[in-house]
């Protein structure tokens, strides 16, 4: 019955890889019918020849079949000469497995990672004599067929570690420490990379970046007790790479995140010299100075230097960093920075973001009267953001001297600019009115009606749903 159910499932959903694999596994593991399982895999691959998962599962199935044949021989206690015919001999020698790999790599081309997936499966069956020669063959395919492919050469370089997981698991069972052995294999990988960088015909920029990826990945996997040596290795490789290729700003930031503070300062100086208009690098340079508690005068000088570059000056990232610092160290400078950020000639994205932040800072450090003065001044400088209006309304509502007329004015101003696109604005307005039903300047029903006639269709649907849930009408 189960067989019929599975057959019906995969015949009705012919392109579902998972169902084909499930059906084949059922035939092999439950029904003990290798021929039926093989037939299903082959049929699925005729329908979906580009499905990598199918090829890999079929490859693994053929290896499991060899394992099954060998177990049967052991149970029957018959010698190899007595039991093997030519066909079975070919199976046990891994010829079928080799054919599956050949067909897979000729069907799915230009995918070195896919080819290496077969090696990982083979290491699960290292008891077979044909496994090592087949692994050598797979790497020879990578070397010859993909000689100009950087990813392929990277995978070849990492060959010493491809069986790492199995080594660790087996050592754990025997309560052995393989740390030293893994370190030796890592060194072999690094030597492989550097040899290929000197000799291969691949794109050096791509291969260097793959080498850097490998080093960073290994560092992330290492325990704290062994980290210092890996940090030193990473620093050395990044330094070599920076001499040979042009590192991206992202790579410089990655490098800085690995090394200690003093080394990071040297690297970030080099990075900002290389990319003087990159805001993320200048922000990191500024952050390093702040971390070491440099004096305010030095920080100001560094910020001024950064802002000589127009792209950096337009970055909200660096403005948030410097204002966060200024708020803790110099109130007068903080206000000067906020005022500078609100100038008409300033970048709009920074201005909009810092409007709300400025309002909140004034609220924390000065009186509600000054908050209102600032709101009136900044709301006249169009455009403003929705958070700016909403933050002011929250500040006003939390004030001991609440001014409902000003709150209404803020809502109405916000509706002019954001009434079509923000259901939340109308919902907050209605909620406020519901809490203050004694106010005579407007009714809830009137505002609700305006919202229905103003909101865009998608926001209107959400508005109606939320109104019903919150009982705002």
Image (tube, grey):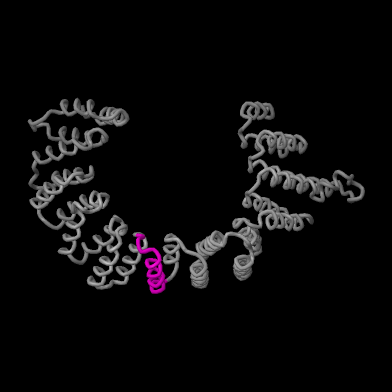
Q: Quadrant of residue 251?
A: bottom left
- Quadrant containing the N terminus is top right
Query: Could you say which is closer to the camera, residue 334 or residue 203?
Result: 203
Instruction: Check the image and name the residue furthest to the right.
Output: 82
Location of residue 71 with respect to 46 vertically, above or below: below
Per the picture, the main secondary structure of the magenta-coloured stretch is helix
> Is 90 located above or below residue 18 in the figure?
below
> Total marks drawn?
0
- Rendering coords of residue 456 (x, y %): 28, 30
Task: Locate residue 236, reporting x and y percent.
Answer: 51, 72
In the figure, is residue 127 to the left or right of 292? right
Looking at this view, is 260 or 298 the one in front? 298
Position of residue 339 measured from the top left corner of the image (x, y, whole percent): 17, 57
Q: Where 224 sits versus 415, above or below?
A: below
The quadrant of the picture occupied by the C terminus is top left
Would residue 368 be visible to someone looking at this image?
yes
The residue shown at (22%, 72%) is 297
Q: Is 173 included in the stretch rendered in magenta?
A: no
Where does the image place residue 173, in percent across and percent down from the top left?
65, 61
Magenta residue span: 260-278
Residue at 63% x, 52% y is: 112
In the image, residue 302 above or below residue 311:
below
Q: Quadrant of residue 385?
A: top left
Asked whether the viewer can see residue 60, the reply is no
On the picture, is 14 further left or further right than 339? right
At x 76% / y 44%, what residue is drawn?
65
Residue 273 lies in the magenta-colored region: yes
The answer to whether residue 299 is left or right of residue 362 is: right
């Amino acid at each position: 019955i189960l067989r019929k159910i599975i057959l019906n499932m995969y015949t009705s959903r012919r392109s579902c890889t998972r169902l084909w694999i499930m059906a084949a596994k059922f035939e092999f593991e439950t029904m003990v019918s290798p021929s039926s399982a093989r037939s299903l895999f082959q049929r699925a691959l005729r329908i979906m020849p580009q499905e990598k998962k199918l090829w890999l599962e079929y490859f693994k199935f053929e290896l499991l079949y060899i394992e099954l044949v060998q177990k049967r021989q052991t149970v029957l206690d018959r010698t190899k000469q007595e039991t093997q015919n030519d066909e079975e001999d070919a199976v046990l020698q891994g010829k079928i497995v080799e054919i599956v790999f050949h067909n897979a790599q000729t069907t799915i081309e230009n995918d070195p990672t896919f080819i290496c997936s077969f090696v990982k499966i083979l290491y699960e069956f290292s008891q077979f004599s044909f496994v090592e020669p087949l692994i050598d063959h797979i790497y020879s395919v990578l070397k010859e067929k993909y000689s100009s492919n950087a990813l392929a050469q990277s995978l070849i370089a990492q060959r010493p570690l491809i069986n790492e997981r199995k080594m660790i698991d087996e050592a754990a069972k025997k309560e052995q420490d393989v740390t030293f052995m893994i370190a030796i294999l890592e060194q072999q990988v690094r030597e492989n990379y550097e040899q290929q960088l000197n000799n291969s015909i691949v794109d050096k920029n791509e291969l260097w970046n793959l080498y850097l990826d490998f080093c960073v990945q290994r560092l992330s996997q290492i325990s704290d007790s062994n980290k210092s040596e890996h940090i030193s290795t990473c620093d050395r490789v990044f330094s070599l790479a920076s001499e040979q290729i042009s590192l991206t700003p992202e790579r410089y930031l990655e490098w800085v995140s690995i090394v200690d503070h003093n080394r990071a300062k040297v690297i970030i100086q080099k990075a900002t010299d290389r990319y003087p208009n990159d805001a993320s690098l200048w922000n990191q340079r500024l952050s390093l100075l702040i971390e070491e508690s440099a004096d305010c005068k030095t920080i100001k000088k560094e910020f001024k230097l950064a802002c000589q570059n127009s792209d950096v000056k337009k970055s909200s990232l660096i403005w948030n960093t410097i204002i966060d610092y200024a708020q803790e160290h110099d109130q007068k400078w903080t206000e000067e920075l906020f005022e500078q950020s609100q100038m008409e000639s300033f970048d709009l994205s920074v201005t909009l973001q810092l409007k709300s932040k400025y309002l909140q800072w004034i609220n924390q450090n000065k009186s509600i009267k000054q908050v209102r003065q600032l709101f009136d001044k900044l709301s006249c400088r169009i455009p403003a953001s929705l958070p700016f209006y909403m933050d002011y309304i929250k500040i006003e509502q939390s004030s001991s001297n609440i001014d409902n007329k000003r709150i209404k004015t803020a809502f109405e101003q916000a509706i002019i600019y954001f009434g079509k696109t923000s259901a939340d604005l109308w919902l907050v307005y209605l909620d406020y009115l519901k809490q203050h039903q004694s106010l005579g300047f407007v009714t809830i029903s009137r505002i609700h009606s305006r919202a229905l006639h103003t909101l865009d269709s998608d926001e209107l649907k959400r508005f109606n749903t939320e109104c019903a849930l919150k009982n705002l009408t």
